[in-house]
Amino acid sequence: MNKYAKRYLIDAMSGMAQGLFASLLIGTIIKTLGQQLLRLNQNAVFQFLVNAGNFATDAHVVGAAMAIGIGFAMGVPALVLFSLAAVGSAANVTGGAGGPLAVLFIAIIAAEMGCLVSKKTKVDIIVTPAVTILVGALLTVLTAKYIGAAASSVGKFLVWTTKLHPFWMGILVSAVVGIALTLPISSAAICAAFGLTGLAGGAAVAGCCAQMVGFAVLSFRENRWGGILSQGLGTSMLQMPNIIKNPKTWIPPILTSMITGPIATCLFKMEMNGAAVSSGMGTCGLVGQIGVITGWFEPSEVAVGHGAVAIQPGFVDWLGLVLICFVLPAVLCWAFGLLFRKIGWIKDGDLALN
């Protein structure tokens, strides 16, 4: 069970997230940059950025990138890997707003079927891609629309519930997605699969930042500036070995997320309407913040489906982004850390990175 859980829930989801980063996410950033520059000057170079971004964010391209990422993470043979491009493209387009979840399920099964026949015949170059694509296509026709609809419904429910109960859902979403970020699973893939945007996406960003910035500041005594960079701009997952040794070290960032989440949803009403994958990224490469900013000017298709519209951000919007993502996580987690060290729940060396 551990082997399969790692293969399908950790490796495959991480690969899917990387495929999203290399297509939808970077494409959105490039396109938004080009669009903002075009507002200043109608220039062929800036228009090229918009066109390049459009190429990368096309649903067919995104689906193919996700499926190839899944196959690569699973270590499938080359012919299976390349064949997954067609599978992912079909599943993502057919799955609609919930396409990423459809791609995850269908690509995994198609990849495993392709692996079963890989190098088993003298005409492997025909049999392996044929089996992979046909299985993927059949599953797409039979299930992708329903998987996508179910994922989209869950996402819409979370977005709607967060609007209805911003305080309690702000706490819940922020804490859960933040915890997922630090666990060896992909919070980004989860947010993408369910299309987590709007206030719910803002709470997710808050929770992820609480973990990353929180752990970076909490462990500054042990890891100094290298820890700030590796955890604050990299990943709080680096602390998992220390969390296993002393689970109490995880309490300060979780408490921080439970505070910053409702502040984001209730006080600043911070929404993440860029690519849904950004909701689960926090401060990793500042992707979460870029997602919030791009969502202000051009909401993603998923966000628009949830009722989002473009806005011109004001001072309060920028202030909320800085406080929720950087200042409050640092201050709160530092304060909780002092308390926990004083009462002996966290000792010197407990948070040291190898």
Image (spheres, rainbow, N blue to C red):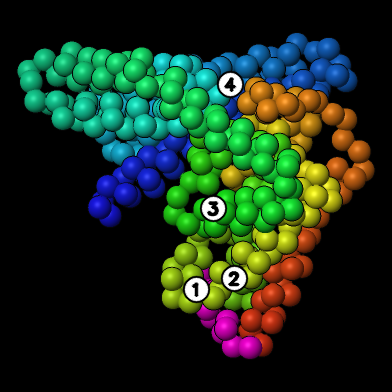
Q: CA distance from mark 4 to mark 1?
A: 40 Å
Q: Confirm or deny contact between disc 4 and disc 1 (CB under 8 A).
A: no
Q: CA distance from mark 1 to mark 3?
A: 16 Å
> Is residue 28 in view?
no
Q: Confirm or deny contact between disc 4 and disc 3 (CB under 8 A).
A: no
Sequence-first tag of 4 and 2: 4
Residue 259 drawn above or below residue 74:
below
Residue 134 drawn above or below residue 306:
above
The kind of secondary structure element at disc 2 is: helix
Q: Label 3, on which residue? A: 181
Sequence-first tag of 4 and 3: 4
**Residue in view at x 69 percent, y 75 percent:** 336
Q: Label 1, on which residue? A: 247
Q: Is residue 353 magenta?
A: yes
**Residue in view at x 73 percent, y 61 percent:** 259
Q: Specify start and end residues of the magenta stretch as a single range.
A: 343-354
Q: Which mark is residue 58?
A: none
On the image, the x and y values in percent for residue 347 come to: 56, 84
Circle 4: residue type: Thr
Sequence-first tag of 1 and 3: 3
Q: Confirm or deny contact between disc 1 and disc 2 (CB under 8 A).
A: yes
Sequence-first tag of 4 and 1: 4
> Is residue 189 in view?
yes
Sequence-first tag of 3 and 2: 3
Q: Label 4, on which residue? A: 57
Circle 1: residue type: Pro
Residue 354 drawn above or below residue 114:
below
In the displayed structure image, the side of residue 200 where residue 41 appears, left or right: right
Circle 2: residue type: Ile
